[in-house]
Amino acid sequence: MARPNGFAYEAHPDGTVHITHHGRRATVLRGDRAARFLTEVTTADPQLVMARWTGNYRRGNERTARAHPRNRG
């Protein structure tokens, strides 16, 4: 699986965190979730953490894989 890339985040003084993916806003975190994200992003791979927090860690082939004969029933 390819490594996620293109993510960036901005922490604002009011406590919100904006996460973007290739320049487009992916999500906004506030309060406790923003604090937990900032702690986690400094201790692990930032791109992987941001992909997980935005839900962009799936690549769209799940439905195709489910329909494969090997994965049926």
Image (cartoon, rainbow, N blue to C red):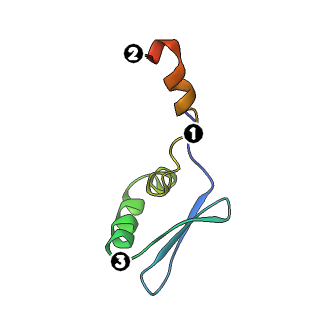
* Residue 35: quarter of image: bottom left
Between tags 2 and 3, which lies in front? 2
Q: How many marks?
A: 3
Question: What residue sits 35% from the left and 77% below the top?
Answer: 31
| Circles 1, 3 touching at the beta carbon (< 8 Å) | no
Label 2 element class: loop
Mark 3 closeness class: few <14, some 14–19, many ≥20 residues within 10 Å: few
From the top left corner, tell me how far across and down residue 16 is, in percent: 45, 78
From the top left corner, tell me how far across and down residue 5 is, in percent: 60, 50
User: Disc 3 residue type?
Assistant: Gly
Between tags 1 and 2, which lies in front? 2
* Residue 20: quarter of image: bottom right
N-terminal of the pair, mark 1 or mark 3, is: 3
Q: Nearer the viewer, residue 71 or 57?
A: 71
User: Disc 1 residue type?
Assistant: Arg
What quarter of the picture does the C terminus occupy?
top left
Q: Which residue is mark 1?
A: 59
**Residue 31's mark?**
3
